[in-house]
Amino acid sequence: MSITADQHVHSHHSGDSEARMEDIAEQAIARGLTELCFTEHVDLDYPDVGDPEITEETFLLDADAYHREYCEVRDRYADRIRLSFGLELGMQPHLGQENTRFVQASPYDLVIASTHVSRRRDPYYPAFYEGRSEEDAIREVLAETLENIRVFEDFDVVGHLDYVLRYLPSRRQRVDMTPFADVIDEILKLIIRREQGLDLNTAPLWKKGSPEMNPSRQILSRYHELGGRIITFGSDAHHAGDVAGAFDTAERIALECGFTEYCVYRNRRPEMKKLISVT
Ligand SMILES: [Zn+2]
Ligand SMILES: [Zn+2]
């Protein structure tokens, strides 16, 4: 494996994780990583999704407390692994300015921008699909993602672009994205123009045994075809044991889709690293 950086990891600073930052750092070292970026959740104005476990507070982030502990852990591990300070920010069309202010208030290395809700509903729950086809649901989420990145620019990579595919009621493992090529192309062209990239999110590979990560090969190949070269790898681990999950498979998929390099972000700037040498 030549990927040496996991750049999508949650610790207890995220509302849905209890992992200790030290345990994550130790696991990353044990897996042979030389870099890891914590990317804690913040979803401002998270809607009421009818789940008693989740409130509108769940995905808020105390960025100061996070930064303080990050600095301590980073310094303690400085001679063993390079730890970075990142964010996974939930976008919604009305939050453009608020999200920009949130990002600018702290010295992040990497900002992942994700669409976790569409029209105030979360694709994680079955109710999202009721009364319509899966295709209609997918189209809605992609259209919302495009709207989100039009009104909010201060990010580095789009998180798990086809995330909605994880939760389709049919549980199908492959979905032909051709019917959505128009909106996908608009998203990809916009991020390429702005020199932003894609978070290659390996969670479907290690968590569900899916043959695809988010996004799928089809989208990844299209991004490459359009000239996109900025990709980051992230396990989306919420437990230390899942750090760098399925990175071997992820690397193989990226190579298949034409990529020879990936990016590691520091101070919001991508640095290119080689994938396994290819002839
Ligand atoms: Zn996410
Ligand atoms: Zn995440």
Image (cartoon, rainbow, N blue to C red):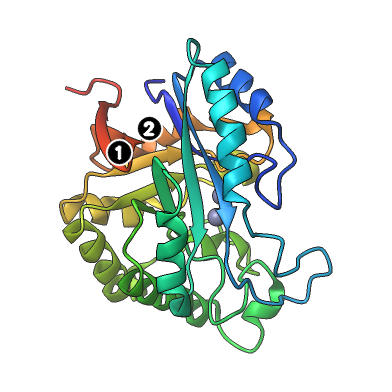
Residue 28 position in % (x across, y down): 56, 22
- Mark 1 and mark 2 in contact (Cβ < 8 Å)? yes
Quarter of the image with the C terminus is top left
User: Image height check: is 26 above or below 6?
Assistant: above
Residue placed at 59% from the left, 80% from the top?
Answer: 120
- Reading the image, the residue beneath label 2 is 252
Residue placed at 52% from the left, 78% from the top?
Answer: 137
Query: Is residue 98 in sight in this rendering?
Result: yes
Instruction: Give 120 or 167, whichever is nearer the viewer.
Output: 120
How many circles with numbers are drawn on the protein?
2
- Judge from the rendering whether residue 216 lies leftward or rightward of residue 128; answer left or right: left
Query: Alpha-carbon neighbours of circle 2 within 10 Å: few (<14), some, or many (≥20)?
Result: some
- Reading the image, the residue beneath label 1 is 256
Query: Is residue 209 in sight in this rendering?
Result: no
Residue 155 position in % (x across, y down): 36, 56
Residue placed at 34% from the left, 37% from the top?
Answer: 265
Query: Could you tell me the amino acid type at mark 2?
Result: Arg
Residue placed at 30% from the left, 22% from the top?
Answer: 276
User: Image height check: is 44 above or below 79?
Assistant: below
Residue 233 position in % (x across, y down): 42, 38
Residue 9 position in % (x across, y down): 56, 39
Q: Is mark 1 within 8 Å of ligand 1?
A: no
Q: CA distance from mark 2 to mark 1?
A: 6 Å
In the image, farthest residue toward the right: 52
Q: Is mark 2 within 8 Å of ligand 2?
A: no
